[in-house]
Image (spheres, rainbow, N blue to C red):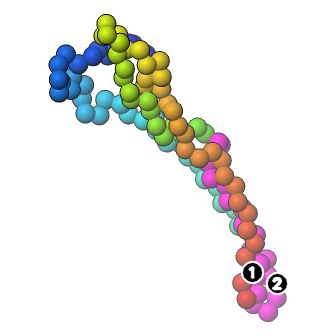
Amino acid sequence: MNWAAFARPSGRLDLGNAPSRFFRMPWIRNTDLSMFKNFEVGGGKRLQIRWEIYNLFNTVNWSALNLQAQFNPAGEQVNAAFGKATAARDPRIMQGAIRFTF
């Protein structure tokens, strides 16, 4: 990150010259998969086996950035975590089910 691009505001209520949407989160890349298999049991009854996977490829999708710029008295930005991702969305989740219809 280019720390020279950030400076302490010059006065009170000075918001600086950054646009309102300066920070953008990375794209969310998510692939879900569902598999179902039906079995006829007889007499109009059915058994269904289900398997569902959310975030199939276990891609890390960031959900928060550290946007707290902290400056020392000399006006230098001192927060080493500034601009870095701090939280992620759910990892891969799998669930299975058996459904009986009568």
Please tell me how crowded label 2 is: few (under 14), some (14-19), or many (20+) other residues with Cα within 10 Å.
few
Instruction: Locate residue 35, reporting x and y percent.
Output: 70, 62
Look at the magenta stretch and give its main secondary structure. Answer: strand
Q: Which residue extends farthest front?
A: 73
The x, y position of residue 67, in whole percent, is: 39, 29
Q: Earlier in the sequence, mark 1 or mark 2?
A: 2
- Would you say the residues marked 1 and 2 are in contact, meaning their CB atoms lie under 8 Å apart? yes
Q: Decide: is 90 above or below 85.
A: below
Q: Secondary structure at mark 1?
A: strand
For the point 60% across and 39% down, the residue is: 59
Queried whether the magenta region covers residue 23, the answer comes back as no
Q: Nearer the viewer, residue 38 or 63?
A: 63
Q: Which residue is mark 2?
A: 41
Amino acid under disc 2:
Val
From which residue to which does the magenta span run?
Answer: 39-58
Residue 76 versus residue 55 in the image, above or below: above
- Name the residue type under label 1: Phe
> Residue at position x 65%, y 43% from top?
57
Q: Residue at x 55, y 44 (%)?
A: 89
* Residue annotated with mark 1: 100
